Amino acid sequence: MGLPQVQPADASAPEGSSYITTPAAAPSSSTGTQLPPEAVELAGRLFDFARQGATSSLDQYLNAGIPINLTNHKGDTLLMLAAYHGHPETVRMLLDRGADVNVLNERGQSPVAGAVFKGYDEIVLAMRDKGADLYAGHPNAVDTARMFRRAELLRAFGVEA
């Protein structure tokens, strides 16, 4: 059901033209499969929708069958991009559709730690409420909250500053 790992014809393509993967479908030994330029363009547009908080546009593509945990060439999911760029409505829509809150990107970063770093408390709490692992990734959400002295989030996490 998911897309296999793919990459554009030009590996130096701009960020919006990045290859895409779905974690469950991409075998670890995969060398990648060429996608038509239109598919790469569509993927870039979807990631831009997440970055821009274009909730209804992204929702329409998800209704049409785009995988909820689609990732870009850096391992960032739609949820991670929406969270990091501060779009609570988009984050809630993705969470309500079952986006995995605990997917780490290739740098070992979690969506919830990114939202803590950016200071988006509403998004952090929404992800926590949907089961985000506050100790996943490096740095994790708890360590990030400590590092930036976000005492209110630490209290919400049930940990000491």
Image (spheres, rainbow, N blue to C red):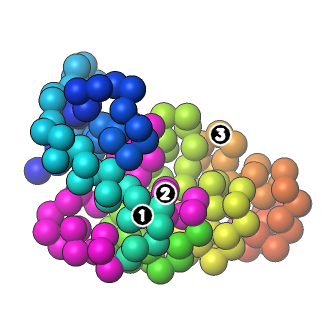
Residue 22 magenta? no
Residue 57 magenta? yes
Residue 20 position in % (x across, y down): 29, 41
Q: Nearer the viewer, residue 89 or 24?
A: 89
Could you tell which of marks 1 and 2 lies nearer the N-terminus? Answer: 1
Could you tell which of marks 3 and 1 lies nearer the N-terminus? Answer: 1
Mark 3 → mark 2, Cα distance in angstroms: 17 Å
Residue at coordinates 55% horizontally, 37% vertically from top-left?
108
Q: Which residue is mark 1?
A: 50
Mark 3, residues whose alpha carbon is within 10 Å: few (<14), some, or many (≥20)?
some
Q: Which residue is mark 2?
A: 81
**Which is in the foreground here, disc 3 or disc 1?**
1
Mark 3 → mark 1, Cα distance in angstroms: 23 Å
Judged from the image, the secondary structure of the residue bearing numbered disc 2 is helix
Residue at coordinates 18% horizontally, 73% vertically from top-left?
63
Q: Are marks 1 and 2 in contact (CB under 8 Å)?
A: yes
Judged from the image, the secondary structure of the residue bearing numbered disc 3 is loop
Query: Which disc, if any, is residue 138?
Result: 3
Residue 40 position in % (x across, y down): 23, 44
Q: Which residues are magenta?
A: 56-85
Quarter of the image where one finds residue 99: bottom left
